[in-house]
Image (cartoon, grey):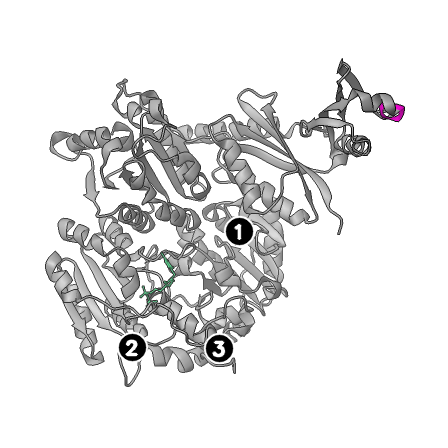
Amino acid sequence: MESLKAQGVQTIFGYPGGSIMPVYDALYDYTRGEKKAFDHILVRHEQGAIHAAQGFARVSGAVGTVIVTSGPGVANTLTGVADAMIDSTPVVVIAGQVGVGVLGSDAFQELDLITVAQPICKWVYQIRRPEDIPWAVSKAYYLAKSGRPGPVVLDFPKNAQVSKCDYMPSTVNFVRSYIASPLPKDDAMREAAALLNSAQKPLALVGQGVELGGAQEELKTFLEKADIPAGRTMLGLSALPSNHPLNVGMLGMHGNLAPNLKQQEADVVIAIGMRFSDRVTGNLNTYLKQAKVIHLDIDNAEIDKNVKTDVAIVADCKEALPMLTALVHKADHKAWRDSFAPLNEREQSRVIEKAIHPQSGPLLMGEVVNAVAEATQGMGVTVTDVGQNQLFATRYSRYHTPRSIITSGGLGTMGYGLPAAIGATFAEKERPVCVFLGDGGLQMVIQELGTIMEYHCPVKIVLMNNNFLGNVRQWQNMFFQKRYAFTHMLNPDYAQICAGYGIAYERVTDRNDLPAAVERMLAAKGAYFLETVIMEEDDVMPMTPPGASVNDMMLEKEANNG
Amino acid sequence: MDKQLYTILIYSENVVGILNLVTAVFTRLQVNIESLNVSPSGIPNVHKYTVTIFSDDEQQVKKLVKQIEKKVDVIKADYYLDSEIFTSEVALFKISTPIVMAHPEISRLIRHTDSRMLEVNETYISVHVCSSSKIIIELYKALARFKCILQYTRSGCVAITRGKEEKVSAFLKEHQNAQLRFMEEGINNDEA
Ligand SMILES: Cc1ncc(C[n+]2csc(CCOP(=O)(O)OP(=O)(O)O)c2C)c(N)n1
């Protein structure tokens, strides 16, 4: 407990069980009375705990903390651990374990956690002796937070939980086998600056690294001086404000047309804190072949992993960007910037208008997201689940403040949204936290409505109910001859469910009622469940078909007539 | 393109489960391990892994090495071609005495390599060979033609680098110094 306190932990998401009971017994004292140091949030399923910790970490930048029992308890968190690994989210999972004496004997609720967790976390350690607790906990938080952040798992056998020893504070901020942030190399910086200074059509690809490094201002200064338009990845959406003149939209399979196509015209591309995910690059054989590529990332293993770079800068962008800003010339690329406009107009008239201002027919996801974005003026935190809801929510939300997009990018974990939004409300007290859910993803974690009820989490839940596993249905429609295998889904009566949990509920079917309903949701004091009844068979466009080149991004479902 | 033999040298902390961690990277990148040797290194508490692989894709080998080095408890990982390292390997053969007696070429083949007899009796001769992987494989193939091999095993290759600098010690020293500088700066800043 003292070790956690020393790390500044305030909020713990957890679920008790046999082999973590000594820790919970200590929590009893540390969550009340004069010893009170923590709030413990009892979730309804351990997956909820880890996603809540992820949401907490994403919005605050602090490490999320999870405490669970051994065996099934920690196994239930593993989806989130893998998710946090691929999306670089700092969380520490403290899991009970059977006593050291019976490890390997198939004891009750024993799970070989080290072996299971190893490939999906940044570091896993088994704390076998109580005297190891202070440094192991300190090292766990240091590793989770520093460098490229990620999940750390502490496997905590029961004997080490109960045996007593004096608390000897320990602070780990150095691990000899690990370099948290490499220093930028001067020659690489000079080469990068030379490329940028010679560029006629430079483009920046901005990722979550900028948010993780807290370098949003440094990014702006850099882009403005060298006059470089910037596309953002889905996880990097709030690294640059939506209304910034150099922001040219979202990259990726369902991103905006202009940055997707224009990156194939750029002469110099600088990737900043992004990892060239296949959802961004499309077919690598045709990707950025014309451009010189500069890659700035804190993780050396990302360099040349997917895209061969001409200049690599392995460093923290918070440190490297100001140095680069000093080296680049003030430039004006107006003609190049202006050349994005026709593509934007094309997307605006052929896709966006239809999605956010439809004149007839059932409600669409795009207009629901847009209604929320207009009501919050882009000052809210957007949380999404996975599926069409995610793609519409990320496309049509607006981001005017840093750290305002929470979504499962790399793993694409359905069930992420609702608990992540719960976690976010514990870190973010000012901005409204709005989560956009599909009917499938909601039902994967619907039990967390109980957590919302118990802790009065002010989550604004926007269910976009299309009675389908919409994203999979879209693929079946486009690539599997409309053979809808098990994607239609019967839904429960959410009004009754919300009544059971005591959560304010409203249902909207008519677009004329939407703005007022959104206002009511935002004005409500606590949680609010807004069910929007969405057209069943709508598709997210534009789209780069899987495996295709980004050049072949389609605006409409039928052939690319571009 | 022909496959090339790469030797990967990995230095890690001596912690539980690290072998799993390292081999999992090979599995994930679909690289077959040809041989693997683990032993303590000359640096206290540091273990050294010598892994050989065949590959026709140097980029893939680079990727592999970077992903291994990314693991928190791995200190350093690098790959080498044969010209950059000294290597050695041990093989043990147990061969049939009657067949050896019938074919004198067999003893000649064995004596041609850096070898010694461990035991000779009327049933078998056990032979210790210390050489390069290539020569050991050639010897094995030659002996196999006589169908005289009762048992055969190889140690896996071990290697040391030819360069004059000691990369791992230098890395540890540099990293440690950087940290000291950083901490001193921190203290100075606190005072300021
Ligand atoms: C845990 C998990 N299982 C399956 C999938 C595959 N999958 C991706 S999107 C999707 C459909 C999601 O449906 P829904 O939650 O209703 O959202 P919609 O697409 O309709 O907005 C599925 C099944 C996934 N991403 N995660």
* Observer-nearest of A207 and A279: A279
Q: Main secondary structure of the magenta part?
A: helix
Amino acid at the residue labelled 1:
Leu
Kindly identify the residue that appears in the image at 85 percent across and 25 percent down.
B106
In the rendering, at what x and y percent does residue A450 appear?
A: 17, 52
Amino acid at the residue labelled 2:
Met
Marks 2 and 1 close (CB-CB < 8 Å)? no
Viewer can see residue A438: no
What's drawn in magenta, residue-wise? B104-108
Q: Please give the count of numbered marks on the rendered protein.
A: 3
Chain-order first, disc 2 or disc 1? 1
Chain letter, disc 3 residue: A
- Tag 1 secondary structure: strand
Chain letter, disc 2 residue: A
- Tag 3 secondary structure: helix
Amino acid at the residue labelled 3:
Leu
Residue A535's label in the rendered image is: 2
Residue A482 in the figure: left or right of residue B94: left
In the rendering, at what x and y percent does residue A237 appear?
A: 39, 61
* Residue at mark 3: A343
Kindly identify the residue that appears in the image at 20 percent across and 74 percent down.
A515
- Tag 2 secondary structure: loop
Residue B145 in the figure: left or right of residue A101: right
Kindly identify the residue that appears in the image at 61 percent across and 66 percent down.
A286
Chain-order first, disc 1 or disc 3? 1
> Vertically, is A86 above or below B138?
below
